[in-house]
Image (cartoon, rainbow, N blue to C red):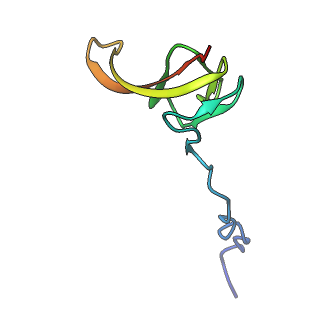
Amino acid sequence: MSHVKAGGSSKNNRNNAGPRLGVKRFGGQTVNTGEVLVRQTGSTKVAGPGTFLSKNFTIHAALPGVVSFQKVKKGKFTGKTVTRTQVSVTSVA
């Protein structure tokens, strides 16, 4: 007779879809207001002019225009500076 209670089948429930993160609109592409530019976990890329950051760190276009990416130096709380990619949208007139 077994002296350990049955554990159940909770070990085989890992069939989840991936989160579909990454850059959705690339440099030089034209976008409309509110379009998703980058989906990310944490702030690996920073929002520049013409963009805004939602609560799950997704970067959206705040105005219609052309997407561009630049490298910028960003200061951390500890005083260390790190290089980050800044996503910005410039309006087309």
Left/right of residue 79 with respect to residue 16 in the rendered view:
left
* Towards the viewer: 35 or 42: 35
Residue visible at 46% across and 29% down?
Answer: 45
Measured as percent of width and height from the top left, residue 27 is found at 48, 34
Residue visible at 68% across and 83% down?
Answer: 2
Above-or-below relation of 88 to 26: above
Measured as percent of width and height from the top left, residue 37 is found at 59, 33
The quarter holding residue 81 reads: top left
Left/right of residue 70 with respect to residue 41 in the rendered view:
left
The quarter holding residue 9 reads: bottom right
Can you say which quadrant of the picture contains the C terminus? top right
Can you say which quadrant of the picture contains the N terminus? bottom right
Above-or-below relation of 20 to 87: below
Measured as percent of width and height from the top left, residue 70 is found at 38, 25
The quarter holding residue 82 reads: top left
Left/right of residue 90 with respect to residue 10 in the rendered view:
left
* Towards the viewer: 9 or 12: 12
